[in-house]
Amino acid sequence: MQERIWALLLLLLLLLLLPPPLCGGPPDSPRQELEPERGPLQPFDLLYASGVAAYYNGDYEQAVRDLESALLSHRRLREVRTRCARHCAVRRPLEPPGAGPGAELPFFRALLERARCYRSCETQRLGGPASRHRVSEDVRSDFQRRVPYNYLQRAYIKLNQLQKAVEAAHTFFMANPEHMEMQQNIENYRMMAGVEEFQLIDREAKPHLESYSAGVKHYEADDFEVAIKYFERALREYFSEDVECRTLCEGPQRFEEYEYLGHKGGLYETIADHYMQVLVCQHECVRELATRPGRLSPIENFLPLHYDYLQFAYYRVGEYVKALECAKAYLLFHPDDEDVQDNVDYYESLLDDSIDPESIEAREDLIMFVKRHKLESELIKSAAEGLGFSYTEPNYWISYGGRQDENRVPSGVNVEGAEVHGLSMGKKSSPKIDRDLREGGPLLYENITFVYNSEQLNGTQRVLLDNVLSEEQCRELHSVASGIMLVGDGYRGKTSPHTPNEKFEGATVLKALKFGYEGRVPLKSARLFYDISEKARKIVESYFMLNSTLYFSYTHMVCRTALSGQQDRRNDLSHPIHADNCLLDPEANECWKEPPAYTFRDYSALLYMNDDFEGGEFIFTEMDAKTVTASIKPKCGRMISFSSGGENPHGVKAVTKGQRCALVSSEIGSSIWKFLMQPS
């Protein structure tokens, strides 16, 4: 057993001796001395606690000072740890073990020297022992979720500093996109301060993600020279961020299976156990760096895509050697990608006769990165087998997350010619839609009037129908609603979950039937609630010509009532723009199918009961959550139905007078229903 652990440690040593990727920037010179900070750095957790206390005491100026200082201290602490790690890696390199008795001593001596270098460097730059800056998991989580910015935006509003309030609110919202109240706050602040969209600043934005997004934007505009500049900058920033991410993984670890201080494992077992936790964390940095704030899922194929964009951009500006380098770099991740293989052959055919194509290799920065990543993977798998812990290697580079452009060729070269030369003209494969998109099936019931289809509503999988309810049924349902609805029902008891200018009340089908059987409302009327929900489900299933049965996911009667005295100069929405089964991200033009969104929903339907109110129009928008593509005025018996994904962002305009009531229903397909109904 001990021999196996020692073999793992030798493999670990090879990893530690492997030089970092070049694009991370040159390491600090051995002669470079790190300058001490001016005065000791104050622990960010103490500053945070002081700022929160000042906020609740109404001392908003002190709250702003302490919270801003806490954020600065937190940022500076990360910088110090990263710089000290790089500094000591150069000043105190690890040495391979020798042979014979005491063979491991040179390695452990170097290890001790590096530890002493770390402690000395951090103490010098922090102005005191690093132990002062250890914080609780709760505080660490608050800073990861950007909670200090929530306090800051409120404090800045109290101080009438609107621009800073907008920045703080936007920064918080970027990491908490499901926070509807903050989204509304931002809109309110922008209107108050006259802030334009381009002035919205994410103070915690990751430079490599910002540069990548800018590169994609310029690439799609055929501005290839500028796109190259941003993609190359994004790579430099990525590798720099990778160094910081890996360094922060070297902090204290959590040992879930036992109390660390009480653990009785031997030297090698303890070292291996601790290091495996560090290494798994470092190995996961590729996922961390590809994940936008507030998201659970990374951008698919993120790092390889940089080289995929670059290979074609360099081709378009005539730099064929660099195009070839980047194409070969992409193949390090996906060696079987036929499109890029064809492009490699084509780029080689464009080189000058004086250049040997075999001499052009993949980008050196990536060669070292991939080599280290593969070695880490081998080590973790070997350790999992030898030390008895479970580990499954994730698929870090999903091949279908490719560029979605047409690989256009230079002017003067036709498509057929490009294909002959081997330059791929096709799009890279993308995930297929899991159902056929059809519509126009029978409406099943008499008197229902077809109004608009998807094309007329400027979207996909949309339909507007009238006369789904009669006037008498609308009155009866409205009467039931007044007898069973509770304030905040369906919104965790919140009276005004989306806007402070309206009161929200709701009730479910189950509650209506329960009240009916108890005699608190007429059973016939309660049964009508259920029957109408079932009618809507059947209409949706039939009109969209679905191959599987739909089942209720959620059916809710909801009324929105305008609050008197709060309607002057309203500029908010009754329900902010959203999608029903994914988290809408207007900045990235994406909709992330992950919790807390109801990812299992397939179709939605809204059935209106009245029109004696002002405002309250239902609207569809583009993915930017701003460009309105269709607006629908509710009235008795009108039903709007649509697929629940990111193709149909929607919301509700402000109800400025009266009460607006609707029956809201969400359905799921039979495959998901069967999965949810499986016994646990």
Image: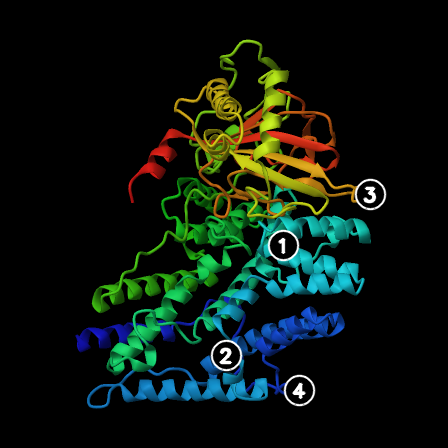
- Dot 3: element: loop
Across and down, in percent, residue 332 comes to 40, 53
Q: Quadrant of the N terminus?
A: bottom left
Q: Circle 2 sits on which residue?
A: 134
Of residues 358 and 555, which is closer to you in this image?
Answer: 555
In the rendered structure, which disc, 2 or 1, sits on the residue that comes first in sequence?
Answer: 2
Q: Three-letter amino acid code at disc 4?
A: Arg
Rendering quarter of residue 413: top right
Instruction: Please tell me which of labels 2 and 3 falls first in the chain.
Output: 2
Q: Taking the image as drawn, is residue 314 in sight?
A: yes
Identify the secondary structure beneath mark 2.
loop
- Where in the figure is residue 339, as x and y percent of width and height? 43, 40
Of circles 1 and 3, the one toward us is: 3
Distance CA(mark 4)–CA(mark 2): 21 Å
Q: Are marks 1 and 3 in contact (CB under 8 Å)?
A: no
Q: Which residue is mark 3?
A: 569
Instruction: Kindly identify which residue carries mark 1.
Output: 173
Looking at the rendering, in which quadrant would you find the C terminus? top left
Residue 33 visible from this viewpoint: no
